[in-house]
Image: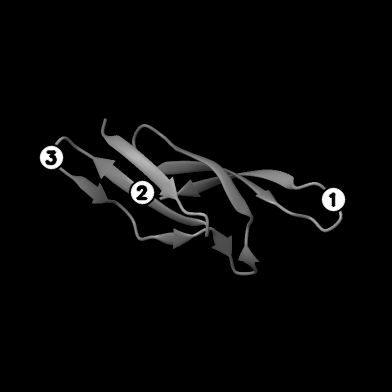
Amino acid sequence: MGNFLVIWTQNSYLRVFSITPKECKQLSVTRKFEDSKGPLGFIKHCQINSDGTKVGIIANKPIAAQSPSNSFYIYDL
């Protein structure tokens, strides 16, 4: 099992890294958290599984005149 790290920016970009004692290597391309219709929301939390293949994302999407709606997504690398 490797050591993996997922990071995200306030602009909803995701990056996944493999961490070893000697180096930190990006595994996939930097990706924007959106679909063909646009942004899916603002990322609140991300977590990667132990083998570095899936990322769980909790995001909220503001809805006009209502409180934000929380959603859970799985990103398959």
Direction right: furthest residue: 65
Residue 40 x/y as whole percent: 63, 57
Quadrant assignment for the N terminus: top left
The image quadrant of residue 58 is: top right
Which labelled disc corresponds to residue 66?
A: 1
What's the amino acid at mark 2?
A: Val
What's the amino acid at mark 1?
A: Gln
What's the amino acid at mark 3?
A: Lys
* Circle 3 residues within 10 Å: few <14, some 14–19, many ≥20: few
Question: Sequence order check: which comes first, mark 3 or mark 2?
Answer: 2
Do we see residue 10 in this rendering? yes
Mark 2 lies on residue: 16
Residue 68 x/y as whole percent: 75, 47
Could you tell me how far apart the alpha carbons at marks 3 and 1 are, in whole angstroms?
48 Å
Mark 3 lies on residue: 22
Q: Name the secondary structure under disc 2.
A: strand
* Circle 2 residues within 10 Å: few <14, some 14–19, many ≥20: many
Residue 26 x/y as whole percent: 28, 52
Residue in view at x 19 percent, y 37 percent? 20
